[in-house]
Image (cartoon, grey):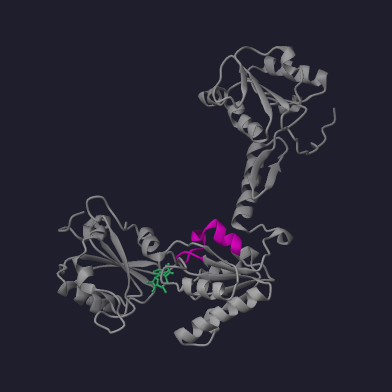
Amino acid sequence: MEQHPPYPSGLILTGRRVLVVGGGHVAQRRVPQLIAAGADVVLVSPEVTPAVEGLATAGEIAWHRRGFEDADLDGAWYVIAATDDAAVNEAVTDGAEHRRVFCVRADDATRASAWTPAVGRHAGVTVAVLGNREPRRSAAVRDEILEGLREGTIVARHQRDRSPGVVLVGGGPGDPELISVAGRKALMEADVVVADRLAPRELLGELPADVELIDVAKLPRGRAAQQEEINRVLVERARAGQRVVRFKGGDSFVFGRGFEEVEACRAAGVPVTVVPGLTSPITVPALAGIPVTHRGVAHDFTVISGHVPPGHPDSLTDWDAVARLHGTLLLMMAVDNAPAIADALLAGGREPGTPVAVVCDGSMPGERTVLSTLGALAADLTREAVRPPAIIVVGDVVAVARPEHYPDRRG
Ligand SMILES: C[S@@+](CC[C@H](N)C(=O)[O-])C[C@H]1O[C@@H](n2cnc3c(N)ncnc32)[C@H](O)[C@@H]1O
């Protein structure tokens, strides 16, 4: 018989009897999908895998513990022949053909009247791929499509969430791979993206052509004025009916001024939601192979902004109290003030030999780690010409990660 391509169709199986003959790994893969479709699954097999047995014990399927009998096909709307015995599969397909019931055959698709596509679901959409009897190819194509849908690189633009409002998206430390799936999706659904200097730039290049990009670095200078202007733009655009993504590096609520934007939106009655991001004080050391906690070494960690030096009237940090902590210190925005911070920690009782790692440009092409100690930090930063952005990790977790550099420390 001439081989035509299959005719795809979505079967509504709710409450309809589906016969599965065989209880091995093929059945184990297919039966949960049938259950999810609401089918009344009857499985016939002398033996089954423990997973299939579990479904029977839980009452999710009916299992007849015996060989196939032709009468099993009575009343079935759909059949899967999945035994490892070709003669049994043949008997099942023959019986199904006789009754005009569509039948999948696991061992020989050419003898079947139906094929099972590679299936996946995302946000209410079912993706089913039939790859001309090449299951690996079908699965690979399905995975590509699902990944595109999840990451937002495949967007049915007319179906996207167009409700006006502001979404604060944390973009992670810089590598475009390190944004969340929800963050990527929000970017793809935006009408306008208001992006910070530290937001992952590469992702902006992937935005659909009709998305407007507002670069915050180009707004009027001065921190307060700039923030007011950002708040104004967010509110104005959302009120004009646009979906606005406020896109930042790391997480919006970790030294990101994100909550000021939430407050501005709320005050203006503009809907605002938050997509968290991987924050740099934890992520950047991790990328450099440095844990922020380690059993028996550091049972707490403290994230501190170093943008105001110790002793400055604007400083809200009690550096004496910080010096007395035993856990890991993670200093952000601290490159310029690192010598003064190291002095404050030493004055508070920390040992000069305390290990320090300065991880610069985490997850970006120029990423590097400068290893030092509290006593030598100022000189090492100058010699290595360290520039922001950097995370400064203080504590014995650095020695745990790089024991060869700190032979005298506990690692
Ligand atoms: C204004 S704060 C923003 C932090 C961001 N909201 C977060 O959650 O990571 C900027 C500081 O974050 C740190 N930082 C952010 N991204 C970094 C990266 N890729 N590598 C090293 N440090 C980074 C640096 O300490 C930098 O000075």
In the rendered view, does 400 fall on the left or right side of 94?
A: left
The x, y position of residue 358, in whole percent, is 31, 68
Name which quarter of the figure residue 238 lies in.
Answer: bottom right
Q: Residue at x 64, y 12 (%)?
A: 67
Name which quarter of the figure residue 311 lies in.
Answer: bottom left
Q: Residue at x 60, y 63 (%)?
A: 186
The x, y position of residue 36, in whole percent, is 64, 35
Q: Residue furthest right?
A: 2
In the rendered view, does 285 fall on the left or right side of 68?
A: left
Boundaries of the magenta span: 170-186
**Magenta span includes 216:** no
Give 52 or 98, whichever is nearer the viewer. Answer: 52
The x, y position of residue 313, in whole percent, is 28, 84
The x, y position of residue 399, in whole percent, is 23, 58
State the quadrant of the N terminus. top right
Residue 307 seen anywhere in this rendered image of the structure = yes
- Which quadrant of the frame does ligand 1 lie within? bottom left
In the rendered view, does 94 fall on the left or right side of 138?
A: right
Give 389 or 219, whichever is nearer the viewer. Answer: 219
336 vs 351: above or below: below
Name which quarter of the figure residue 2 lies in.
Answer: top right
